[in-house]
Amino acid sequence: MAAITMKKIVKRYGDGFPAVNEVSLDVRDGEFMILVGPSGCGKSTLLRMIVGLEDITSGEMVIGDRVVNRVAPRERNLSMVFQNYALYPHLTVFENIAFPLRLAKTPDAEVKRRVNETAELLELTEHLERKPANLSGGQRQRVAMGRAIVRQADAFLFDEPLSNLDAKLRGQMRTEISRLQRRLGVTTVYVTHDQTEAMTLGDRVAVLRKGVLQQVGSPRELYEQPVNLFVAGFIGSPSMNFLPASVDGTTLETPLGRFEVRDERKAAALEGREVVLVGIRPEHFEDASLVSEEKKAHGSVVAAHVDVTEWLGNELYAYVPYEAPDDLAAQLRELSRELDGDQLRTQAVVALDASSPITPGRDAELWIDTSRIHIFDPSTGDNLTRDEEHVAELGRLGEEHREAKRDAQRHAERPAPEASTSEASTSEASAPEAPTEP
Amino acid sequence: MESARSKWLWIVASLLILVWTVFPILWIVMLSFKQPGEIGNQKGFLPHHWTWDNYRTVFKTDLFTSALINSIGISVIATFVGVVFATLVAYAIARLEFPGKKLILSFALAIAMFPVVSLVGPLFNLWRDIGLYDTWLGLIIPYISFALPLAIWTLSAFFREIPWEMEQAAQVDGATAWQAFRKVIVPLAAPGVFTAAILTFFFCWNDFVFGISLTSSDNARPVPAALAFFTGASQFEQPTTAICAAAVVVTVPVVVIVLAFQRRIVAGLTSGAVKG
């Protein structure tokens, strides 16, 4: 086990394009770190630099207390799960898992014991003599994990390990990976573009954009206190709404209507500015008719034209198109494209209570929780209302959560036999292991 | 095959080609079972009196048995050395970036295009001067150099098919580049290696030009060349039937090899490597 420290890591390709630019990141010992970002943001490249499959142009990569810039992958003692699993098709599952041990010239009895233990942990025991070609996607994934955890690696690296599985299996494997990581307590770096994976798995999440590190923090911190437009837009689904607003004292004039900023700190951020972008998460809207008078008082009510609604049972999404000044509209479109979306029109997505009687095509009264809004500088994209005190508090909270989760996992390990049998039966029942066709 | 009619067309066409190619072989087989005196005297495709005499004659002749040993030895050695070389070269071409890569490939292609006959004269003189004339090595060297290009092209295509991640995974698992190559890449490229080996073996086995010009005795003369010197059981008869028997004998190993390795060549060993 080891901490991984990256100091101003740069990766420049032949054409001079920096795929990763001056990334400094500290992965603590035993921590589960997620690298997330839209495609092409350099997250996989960064991971491959950690493991040594990509050269580092400049900067320093430290694993444990060793600078590994010039160390071959096999001497870094890391293990990696590849996106396409990269199993050895000519070897049985047993030999696939045993491969790293065989290379290390581990004695046969030891190999047997460790592989069997690993297989048991991953419920692969009955498949040990099969070839990877005859396994289902989920089973192959588990073999790849087995190969990674069979030896005492200093850290685990995952490169989008779940992206080839179907949604249901992905959910199961997600909890499986989380459980495994806490149990083994090994430093883990996990690359994904999936938000759910990022939010649920990580102790901390690092958001990358075009090779530049945007923000590192607990999932909660990223969600509640994003540093800029990009992080705010990337984390959360549906995305945060960004409304252009002209400032008039402490009043904001947005395409959805006027509202007052009452919070002193937020009002201070408006000082001396003419135009800002207001970020409001979909869930901070509500159908005004369902909001109590008392609650209404600490927000604002605006009238909006609802274009389309989507009723999902537990909530209702309403789409509110609005007009934005051309330059800002172009900027928002650019942002949306960068976030792997392609929003054609400027519209706000609001999540309302499912009992809301709002009808598409009519005007509706929407209540906005103005205490939860973010204000962004339209030119730099910086969040002007980030609350450092709150960030520190969230950091502490995240740390506590991490400790608690690990302790819980350790305690759960004690009565091991029961725990593993109950898991076996649940996953057996819910995972029909039919071989998946390509 | 979208309709029954086109299916029939395919069947008819394949049958025609089959007959076209199989007929000469069958003819040789039939001739090899006829009595020497039957040719030119009695008509008919099938032998009137089936006989194994020709085969007996063939194996009793020193000329043939020594040629058979030469052929097997030379072909096997040339194939083995050639394929080992080709595997290394093809791997480098498929996986590594180095200056002159294009040059090597086009050079290999140029050699493959080179007319073999034009080299026979110079080689004959050179081999005589340096003492390689009429030796196994004297045949193995040209065989390897002419079989290499094809083997390199075949193998590098196979190597390119193997996902990069296989090797990277092996490296992360603690393998050196050589271990990754030997334990992961070569087994995965096995169908390619077999294909290349078989092609090389056929090239060496079937060669006539080098075999007849660079040898002069039983020392190194391979079967195709030896057939030309065949006299049969008695000098008063045409040795046609015996030559045919010898031809059948040298064809058999080729057929056996193809049948034996056909499945290995066809089998897609890489399936299941990646997500599938």
Image (cartoon, rainbow, N blue to C red):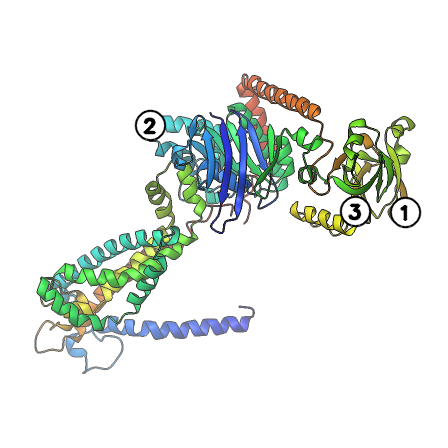
- Asked whether the viewer can see residue B227, the reply is no
Q: Position of residue A279 (x, y in %)?
A: 76, 38
The tally of labels here is 3
Picture residue at 86% right of the left edge, 28% below the top: A298
State which quadrant residue A220 falls in.
top right
Tag 2 subunit: A
Which residue matches tag 3? Answer: A347
Disc nearest the viewer among 3 and 1: 3
* Residue bearing the label numbered 2: A107
Q: Is residue A222 above or below residue B183?
A: above
Badge 3 marks a residue whose secondary structure is strand
Residue B39 in which image quadrant: bottom left
Describe the element under mark 2 as helix, strand or loop: loop
Task: Determine whether, in the image, residue A400 is placed left or right of residue B221.
Answer: right
Chain under callout 1 = A
Residue B170 image point, x, y percent = 40, 40
Tell me whether the residue at label 2 lies in contact with that at label 1, contact meaning CB atoms closer than 8 angstroms: no
B43 and B114: which is toward the camera: B114
Q: Secondary structure at mark 1?
A: loop
Q: Earlier in the sequence, mark 2 or mark 1?
A: 2
For the residue pair B133 and B168, the one nearer the viewer reads as B168
Foreground residue among A229 and A409: A229
Numbered badge on residue A362: 1
Q: Amino acid at mark 2?
A: Pro
User: Can you tell which quarter of the image residue B47 is in?
Assistant: bottom left
Q: Would you place residue A436 above or below residue B238 in this image?
A: above
Where does the image place residue A276, in percent across and percent down from the top left? 77, 40
